[in-house]
DNA sequence: TCAAAAGTGTAGCCCTGGCTTTATTTGGCC
DNA sequence: GGCCAAATAAAGCCAGGGCTACACTTTTGA
């Protein structure tokens, strides 16, 4: 395969992977948020989810519907939203990854507030391999 | 303002910022790609853009239309696509930021190939402040 | 030269993730 | 016990970013 063709497929693969990561980012954010609310208040209400995500209630309802389709959450009409086992596991992974990304940014000299802001978008594109490297870096650095 | 309300608005702000970054990510990627093609071949053809982005040509056409709306590119029917001054400036910024993000990932122990993959999604969420910190880190590290 | 191939444009569809508006249910309180 | 406010649901709109199908140019080469 000529070099130019290889360049094209490599680039396309990268973009396709980035697009795929984006499609699960929303699920991850909502799962984490619902997990937080379940811990704080025992249940996650649609109104609370919406307020914290910075969206309107119908938008939150749609996102929850998608979480339910994916088997990550359950809810009954006019009742709170709860994460399933899978949802809780996802929320935990997301939370842990978020902490690592923020820690790495701060270790590199990024102010805490900025680290939080940037991590929110970056974290969804941090692969397992990169996450492992981040953890090693943090440990090695002490 | 009570602490809980502050928590909610802070989180909402982070998500809103991440969403805003996402909405310009596509423009950035296409601008960079078109810039690359202009350098390599003198012009960017829709088919080449589409192939490298890993999408069909109508999708590339739509993206170019948006670039034109934003004043970042120009084109005439059945002719190549060219970046405006603003588009070239954006492409340069994006390219430079991409290099820095990849370099930082590699410096942290991420394999080159994975660094390229992850950087593609992460870079759009790297703020000016974080980028500056990355550059300082790379220089300090030598 | 002119017909086929390649490239480009356009229309229309789908899904996601925002939104507003309108209906329904719940729940607290008099 | 019943009413009203708050919460939730439902429906429908919009833009973005994918896609396919089809129409139309442009280029190429027999």
Image: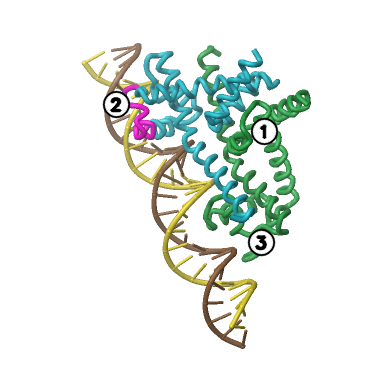
Chain colours: A green, B cyan, C yellow, D brown
Q: Chain of mark 3?
A: A
- Determine if the magenta segment contains residue A134: no
Badge 2 and badge 3 in a common chain? no
Q: Which mark is residue A80?
A: 3
- Which residue appears at 62% of the width and 38% of the height? A116
Nearer-the-camera pick, B74 or B57:
B74
In the rendered view, tell whether residue A40 sits above or below residue B32.
below
**Can residue B81 be seen in this snapshot?**
no
Say which residue appears at 56% left-offset and 48% top-offset.
B12
- Give me the chain letter of mark 1: A
Stretch of the chain drawn in magenta = B65-80
Q: Tell me how far mark 3 sits from mark 1, CA to CA.
A: 31 Å
The N terminus of chain B is located in which quarter?
bottom right
Q: Is any part of residue B102 visible from this angle?
A: yes
In the drawing, does residue A97 fall left or right of residue B120? right
State the mark number for residue B76: 2
Q: Residues within 10 Å of mark 1 (few under 14, many from 20)?
A: many
| Residue picked out by circle 1 | A101
Q: Residue at x 34, y 35 (%)?
A: B69
Residue A22, image x and y in percent?
Answer: 57, 38
């Amino acid at each position: 395969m000529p070099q130019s063709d290889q360049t094209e497929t490599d680039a396309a693969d990268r973009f396709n992977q980035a697009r795929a990561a984006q499609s699960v980012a929303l699920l991850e954010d909502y799962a984490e948020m619902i997990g937080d609310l379940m811990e704080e208040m025992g249940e996650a209400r649609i109104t609370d989810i919406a307020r914290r995500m910075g969206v309107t209630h119908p938008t939150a309802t749609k996102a929850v519907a998608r979480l339910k389709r994916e088997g990550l959450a359950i809810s009954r009409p006019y009742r709170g939203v709860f994460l399933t086992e899978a949802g809780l596991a996802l929320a935990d992974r997301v939370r842990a990854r978020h902490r690592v990304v923020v820690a790495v940014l701060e270790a590199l000299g990024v102010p805490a507030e900025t680290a939080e802001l940037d991590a929110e978008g970056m974290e969804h594109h941090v692969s397992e391999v990169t996450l492992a490297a981040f953890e090693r870096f943090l440990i090695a650095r002490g």
